[in-house]
């Protein structure tokens, strides 16, 4: 009988669940939550930047789902990279929000920090496992 391959994946559910959850969360806030990008004075760069950072992250996570569905060997690496981009984007929103004294995002700074750290830690863990 043949020996089992320790690198063989038994199913794609685990590979799809995390990017799906990430795509849903970032996609909801980026596309569906109705976040404003302008006020009476015109477009607010902080708000517009925040929405587009969320949208880009959602699209990156959606592309990771497509890679996983295609059983691409790079899907986990792509997911880890997308998570790092999302974490950097959340940190950028956090810093930008603190520097912009005239406007504020719809997200509490602590929530941004928690999600940035969570995405960053999970992404580094995913990349370490994928690159072994």
Image: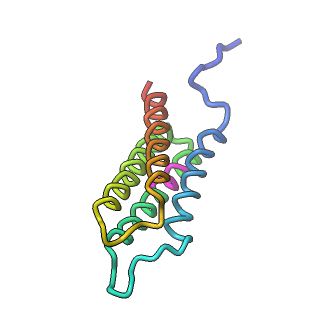
Q: Is residue 92 left or right of residue 23?
A: left
Q: Residue at x 31, y 72 (%)?
A: 102
Quarter placement of the N terminus? top right
| Total residue callouts | 0
Q: In the figure, 67 relative to 52: above or below? A: above
Q: Residue at x 48, y 28 (%)?
A: 129
Q: Is residue 2 left or right of residue 29?
A: right
In this view, the residue farthest toward the right is 1
Q: Is residue 45 left or right of residue 124?
A: left
- Write down the quadrant of residue 15 in the picture: top right
Q: Residue at x 40, y 66 (%)?
A: 52
Nearer-the-camera pick, 117 or 97: 97
Where residue 42 appears, x then y in whole percent? 33, 84
- Write down the quadrant of residue 105 in the picture: bottom left
- Write down the quadrant of residue 9 in the picture: top right
Q: In the figure, 103 relative to 120: above or below? A: below
Where residue 87 appears, x then y in whole percent? 41, 48
Q: In the figure, 96 relative to 13: above or below? A: below
Q: Residue at x 47, y 32 (%)?
A: 125
49 in magenta:
no
The majority secondary structure of the magenta stretch comes to helix
Q: In the figure, 2 relative to 8: above or below? A: above
Q: Which residues are magenta?
A: 60-65
Nearer-the-camera pick, 119 or 67: 119
Q: How is the image coloured?
A: rainbow
Where residue 56 appears, x then y in whole percent? 42, 60
Quarter placement of the C terminus? top left
Where residue 34 appears, x then y in whole percent? 53, 75
């Amino acid at each position: 009988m043949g020996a089992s391959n320790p690198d063989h994946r038994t199913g794609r559910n685990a590979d799809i669940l995390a990017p799906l959850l990430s795509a849903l969360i970032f996609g909801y806030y980026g596309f569906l939550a109705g976040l404003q990008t302008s006020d009476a004075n015109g477009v607010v760069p902080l708000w517009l930047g925040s929405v587009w950072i969320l949208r880009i992250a959602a699209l990156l996570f959606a592309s990771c789902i497509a890679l996983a569905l295609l059983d691409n060997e790079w899907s986990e690496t792509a997911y880890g990279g997308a998570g790092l981009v999302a974490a950097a984007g959340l940190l950028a929103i956090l810093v930008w929000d603190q520097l912009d004294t005239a406007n504020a995002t719809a997200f509490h700074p602590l929530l941004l920090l928690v999600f940035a750290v969570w995405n960053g830690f999970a992404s580094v863990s995913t990349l370490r496992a994928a690159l072994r």
